[in-house]
Amino acid sequence: MTTEDAIWSALEEVDDPEVGVNIVDLGLVYEVKVDENGRARIEMTLTIPECPLADDIVKNVKEAVGAISGVKEVDVSLVWEPRWSPARMNDKAREEIRSRQRV
């Protein structure tokens, strides 16, 4: 597994605490890059710019990615363009949200 693949897998373990779905399936992660020095750069967004849990989500991303062998530094950039919308979610996220609404 390449380091970028490992990062994507680790990010699938990070949930948006308000939605209860991982940030990859929600479509919040836009880009993952790793340089030759083990510096991981993640470009992502949040469902809303004024998300009260932004610091927690970024901290969880840094912890998850920082635990990967070979990753020495983690930079997370929050971006607002392109703007997130529910259309960015994959089918897995949609089904998970639907199943919670049925309960």
Image (cartoon, helix red, strand yellow):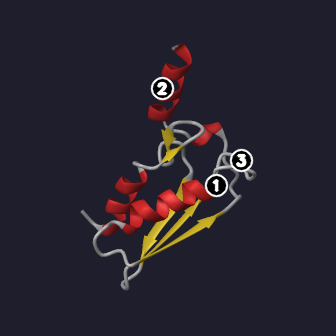
User: Which residue occupies 48% across, 59% down?
Assistant: 61
**Secondary structure state at the residue bearing disc 2:** helix
Disc number placed over residue 48 in the picture, else none? 3
User: Which residue occupies 39% across, 68% down?
Assistant: 66
Q: Residue furthest right?
A: 50
State the CA–CA distance, disc 3 to disc 2: 21 Å
The mark closer to the camera, 1 or 2, is: 1
Label 1 crowd (10 A; few <14 / some 14-19 / many >=20) = some
State the CA–CA distance, disc 1 to disc 3: 9 Å
Q: Identify the residue under disc 2.
A: 95
Mark 3 vs mark 2: which is more N-terminal? 3
x, y percentage for residue 47?
66, 46
Q: Residue furthest left?
A: 1
User: Which residue type does callout 1 highlight?
Assistant: Ala
Q: Identify the residue under disc 1.
A: 54
The mark closer to the camera, 3 or 2, is: 3
Q: Nearer the viewer, residue 49 or 94?
A: 49
x, y percentage for residue 85?
67, 42
Query: What quarter of the picture does the N terminus occupy?
Result: bottom left
x, y percentage for residue 38?
37, 80
Label 2 crowd (10 A; few <14 / some 14-19 / many >=20) = few
State the CA–CA distance, disc 1 to disc 2: 24 Å
Mark 1 vs mark 2: which is more N-terminal? 1
**Secondary structure state at the residue bearing disc 1:** helix
User: Which residue type does callout 3 highlight?
Assistant: Ile
Q: Is residue 94 above or below residue 67?
A: above
Disc number placed over residue 78 in the picture, else none? none
Label 3 crowd (10 A; few <14 / some 14-19 / many >=20) = few
In the image, taking residue 15 as reference, residue 80 lies left or right, namely: right
Marks 1 and 2 close (CB-CB < 8 Å): no
User: Which residue occupies 55% across, 42% down?
Assistant: 17
